[in-house]
């Protein structure tokens, strides 16, 4: 079997494609090659923390210049690195060609000056990134705080090139030294961005502080060497237990884990949706987008949809009608947004066919050609296989009261798309208690802002080291050396 | 079609000596007739046939679109059990069986065990359940007739040798039964304990030897699987446990605590009373190995008569056993042969392993090898690997068309050197679910079903 593609090692500006070893993949349909990381792992981390100083000699304007030039060069039509990454993702990813090609269009706007500045300022604060921010405390001392970057290792998700691009953006604006473990389902996007960076800013400090390579998750020969506090201070790990469990054994004082857990999302539709045909159609169109974008591979996609239609006869009729409309809108989505899944989950469709034959409890709309489907529950609970929903299959659940919709939210919940806005306001102080992390207008679940917290944490602030410089004037801040033996209470309080 | 046992003179040799062409013609006729009956009597078959526009089946492949996935037997909402809506559960089951369940009284039904008991009392059914990963139980409407018939078939397959007509001792063996499991219970295959009791010991309790004396409570097991499912969905924090059930948790723990004592008693019993006797023992590889290991550790080996019937199968079910596990089992048992069978709950009897290690398909079962992705039938010639499916026309209580989760190989042109004329599954059988997810480190941000199965394994501590 010949290798479908090679994942080179991008080592701080240098591209290495030697000492290749083969990696098989899940289906066994193809193999790819990458340099044997056991041979290069010693070269991956920064030699000495002193080498970080060059990043602090950079002005933020210069960072903006480099990122803007990078963005301009990330033009799919002319950038051969991206085209190569696209070719590789055609074999490695589950999405169809048109959608993958389209996913590269989002890279350029990500790196514009305005966007980078907005992300940096809102998610950390430009003043903290670029200097010491003073603040006077009650006891009189002068506090100055600055956000330093750190030596970070990223294990990003591979279901879309945006994740790799955001990873690089976050690292650069925090002046971090970054090592990225390329995901096997998007093997070349991070490398392509790194190589483009080397093209536009050869030997620039930003380029010299970036390494991207592939090794198999859990490879002890690599990870035992690399995942040490003298090399890496923080690990940002996307993905579930399988990827995180490899990492947790290395967590110790000096090495912190920032886990961006896998998530699921849900939808809540208020009774207002059923006021008239036009409202229902509008809601169906929005819900279809939340389900269908990128074939429901993402964490933000809608899966279980609660509708406050009621569960009496009229309510069920409304829910079934809405289910039909959502299905119509779903299959009508343009192919760069959504298509029938290329690799439908067979187990899921078996459940679907059995639900279809269980009319007392479920109404299955579509799905006979594996194109996607809407299962409308005929009572107020989701299907028992709700965790399997993927490939454009959603479950519409009619409920009687707003109290029931908290069932939509659990510890794995990320986004809740809600219609109308008034219902969102009503629910926003309650749903987070059960686990919801992001509430958004119906139809925007997959339109994710980068300048925003993610998964209920602020990953960029957490990637930083928050360093304090204190200035204490003995005339205002009571000095300990002047405290007599009589007054020990203040000392005790310290 | 309704009585193949006597059609073949109760002879395993005759069952597997009939010429292929002749058998296939009989199978086609039987398939056609059984479909005609079940189309009338089983609602789900009628619905599916109507939807697909199948009025009659003439060739084997005509029945393929009507084969049911395993999900058909768990398509009821699990909430029905939580809410004790056993009336609706009965109504759901009614769609899957040829018997009329409309008059079953479920008034005041307290749980799954109670419900199964009522079905036993009020209908010809003897349902079998098994647990799944999604927190729902499969419920397969087997009947008492099939259970009796199944035990007769087991005896035929276990004690007869292919190539010789059965002797009187083979037809009416008098054996002690070793059951390396809990003595009774209505959950899944524990039900078989009662069938074996009836079929093999003539009701003589003293001839039935279970590893543990107690019964496993289905409702408790259902709660355990529900807790695991809730944990995997991140909803354990708001699972409401039926208080009546929660108090029984202690009983279960006590039962588990007694296991070492029970194990000692079991071994004392078999060494003192059963040494050298002809026995029948059945269990999965894992259970067999566990018992054999425990026996050898106590210095007990070669316990039974050489012509004892030992039956195992069912794959390793994710357990990791040492390479020499078959040797360990053989050394402990001391028997001439250990028989293997292949089958799944949605069909009738096992397909018995031959001297060549192939599982020969029983004559009342039409086997199919399907494309694993599309479920289209692969050609019935040459060597084909794919998903196993069967149409079993022996079954009366429920539809005999079933698609398995197993990857199998059939060499359709092979005349097996063992001498049996029947078509056979090759020995290597693997579950597709075990095949997936190997050697893969794809990462996505979406919480998938696989992620949750991992979480379930991780959270075994949540077990009751």
Image: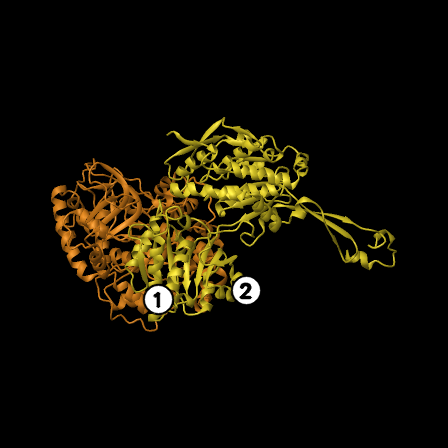
Chain colours: A yellow, B orange
Q: Name the side, left or right, on which B175 lies relative to A433.
A: left
A13 up-or-down from B191: above or below: above
* First along the sequence among labels 1 and 2: 1
* Residue B333 pos. (x, y %): 34, 44
A168 up-or-down from A6: above or below: below
Label 2 Cα crowd, 10 Å radius (few <14 / some 14-19 / many 20+): few
Whether residue A225 is visible, yes or no, is no
Label 1: which residue?
Answer: A318
B366 or A165: nearer the viewer? A165
Q: Name the residue at 16% across, 59% down.
A: B37
Tag of residue A278:
none
Q: Name the side, left or right, on which B33 lies relative to B241.
A: left
Establish whether labels 1 and 2 are both on one chain. yes
Element under disc 1: helix
B229 up-or-down from A6: above or below: below
Q: Chain of mark 2?
A: A
Q: Name the side, left or right, on which A175 lies relative to A159.
A: right
Task: Measure the C-alpha gap from mark 1 to mark 2.
Answer: 28 Å
Label 2: which residue?
Answer: A429
* Residue A273 pos. (x, y %): 41, 65
A28 or B400: nearer the viewer? A28
* Residue A84 pos. (x, y %): 44, 33
Q: Chain of mark 1?
A: A
């Amino acid at each position: 079997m010949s290798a479908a593609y090679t994942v080179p090692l991008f080592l701080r500006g240098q591209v290495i494609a030697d000492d290749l070893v083969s990696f098989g993949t899940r289906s066994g349909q193809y193999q790819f090659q990458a340099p044997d990381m056991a041979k290069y792992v010693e070269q991956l981390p920064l030699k000495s923390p002193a080498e970080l100083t060059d990043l602090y000699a950079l002005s933020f304007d210069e960072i903006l210049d480099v990122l803007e030039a990078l963005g301009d060069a990330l033009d799919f039509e002319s950038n051969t690195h991206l085209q190569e990454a696209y070719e590789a993702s055609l074999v490695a990813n589950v999405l169809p060609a048109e959608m993958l090609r389209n996913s590269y269009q989002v890279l350029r706007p990500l790196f514009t000056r305005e966007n980078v500045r907005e992300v940096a300022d809102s998610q950390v604060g430009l003043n903290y990134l670029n200097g010491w921010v003073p603040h006077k405390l009650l006891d009189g001392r002068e506090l100055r705080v600055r956000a330093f970057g750190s030596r970070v290792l990223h294990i990003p998700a591979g279901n879309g090139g945006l994740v790799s691009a955001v990873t690089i953006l976050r690292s650069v604006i925090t002046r971090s030294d970054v090592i990225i473990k390329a995901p096997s389902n998007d093997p070349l996007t991070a490398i392509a961005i790194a190589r483009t960076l080397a093209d536009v800013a050869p030997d620039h400090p930003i380029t010299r502080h970036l390494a991207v390579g592939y090794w198999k998750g859990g490879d002890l020969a690599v990870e035992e060497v690399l995942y040490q506090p003298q090399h890496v201070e923080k690990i940002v790990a996307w993905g579930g237990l399988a990827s995180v469990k490899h990492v947790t054994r290395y967590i110790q004082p000096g090495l912190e884990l920032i886990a961006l857990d896998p998530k699921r999302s849900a939808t809540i539709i208020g009774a207002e949706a059923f006021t008239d045909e036009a409202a229902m159609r509008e809601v169906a169109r929005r819900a279809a987008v939340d389900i269908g974008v990128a074939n429901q591979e993402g964490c933000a996609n809608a899966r279980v949809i609660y509708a406050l239609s009621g569960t009496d006869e009229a309510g069920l009729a409304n829910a079934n009608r809405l289910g039909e409309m959502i299905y119509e809108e779903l299959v009508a989505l343009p192919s760069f947004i959504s298509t029938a899944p290329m690799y439908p989950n067979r187990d899921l469709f078996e459940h679907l066919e059995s639900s279809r034959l269980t009319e007392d409890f479920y109404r299955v709309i579509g799905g006979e050609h594996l194109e996607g489907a809407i299962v409308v529950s005929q009572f107020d609970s989701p299907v028992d296989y709700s965790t399997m929903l993927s490939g454009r299959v959603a479950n519409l659940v009619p409920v009687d009261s707003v109290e029931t919709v908290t069932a939509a939210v659990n510890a794995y919940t990320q986004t809740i798309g809600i219609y109308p806005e008034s219902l969102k306001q009503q629910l926003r102080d309650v749903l987070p208690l059960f686990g919801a992390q992001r509430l958004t207008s119906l139809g925007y679940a997959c339109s994710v802002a980068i300048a925003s917290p993610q998964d209920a944490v602020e990953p960029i602030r957490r990637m930083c080291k928050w360093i304090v410089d204190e200035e204490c004037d003995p005339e205002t801040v009571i000095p300990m050396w002047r405290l007599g033996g009589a007054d020990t209470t203040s000392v005790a309080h310290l | 079609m309704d009585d193949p046992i006597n059609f073949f003179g109760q002879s395993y040799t005759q069952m597997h000596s009939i010429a292929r062409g002749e058998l296939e013609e009989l199978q086609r006729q039987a398939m056609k007739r059984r479909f005609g009956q079940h189309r009338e009597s089983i609602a789900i078959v009628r619905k599916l046939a109507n939807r697909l526009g199948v009025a009659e089946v003439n060739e084997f492949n005509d029945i393929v679109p009507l084969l049911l996935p395993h999900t058909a037997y768990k398509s009821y909402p699990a909430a029905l059990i939580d809410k004790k809506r056993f009336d609706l559960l009965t109504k759901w089951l009614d769609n899957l069986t040829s018997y009329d369940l409309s008059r079953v009284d479920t008034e005041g039904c307290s749980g799954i065990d109670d419900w199964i008991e009522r079905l036993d009392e009020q209908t010809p059914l003897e349902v079998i359940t098994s647990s799944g990963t999604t927190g729902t139980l499969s419920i397969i409407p087997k009947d008492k007739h099939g259970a009796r018939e199944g035990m007769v078939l087991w005896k035929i397959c276990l004690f007869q040798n292919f190539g010789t007509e059965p002797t009187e001792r083979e037809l009416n063996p008098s054996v002690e039964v070793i059951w390396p499991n809990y003595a009774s219970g209505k959950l899944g295959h524990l039900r078989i304990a009662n069938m074996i009791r009836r079929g093999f010991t003539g009701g003589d309790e003293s001839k039935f030897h279970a590893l543990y004396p107690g019964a496993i409570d289905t409702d408790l097991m259902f709660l355990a699987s529900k807790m695991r499912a809730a944990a995997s969905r991140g909803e354990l924090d708001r699972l409401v446990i039926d208080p009546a059930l929660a108090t029984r948790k202690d009983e279960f723990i006590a039962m588990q605590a007694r296991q070492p004592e029970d194990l000692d008693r079991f071994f004392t019993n078999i060494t003192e009373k059963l040494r050298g006797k002809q026995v029948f023992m059945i269990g999965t590889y894992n259970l067999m190995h566990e018992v054999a290991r425990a026996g050898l550790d106590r210095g007990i080996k070669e316990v039974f008569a050489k012509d004892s019937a030992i039956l195992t199968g069912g794959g390793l079910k994710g357990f990791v056993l040492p390479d020499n596990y078959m040797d360990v089992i053989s050394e402990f048992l001391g028997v001439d042969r250990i028989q293997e069978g292949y089958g799944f709950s949605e069909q009738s009897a096992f397909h018995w392993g031959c001297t060549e290690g192939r599982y020969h398909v029983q004559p009342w079962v039409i086997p199919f090898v399907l494309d694993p992705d599309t479920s289209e039938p692969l050609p019935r010639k040459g060597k084909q690997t794919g998903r196993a499916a069967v149409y079993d026309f022996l079954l009366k209580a429920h539809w005999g068309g079933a698609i398995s989760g197993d990857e199998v190989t059939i060499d359709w042109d092979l005349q097996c050197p063992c001498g049996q004329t029947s078509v056979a599954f090759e020995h290597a059988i693997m579950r597709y679910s075990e095949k997936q997810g190997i050697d893969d480190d794809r990462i996505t941000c979406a919480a998938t079903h696989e992620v949750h199965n991992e979480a379930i394994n991780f959270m075994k501590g949540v077990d009751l």
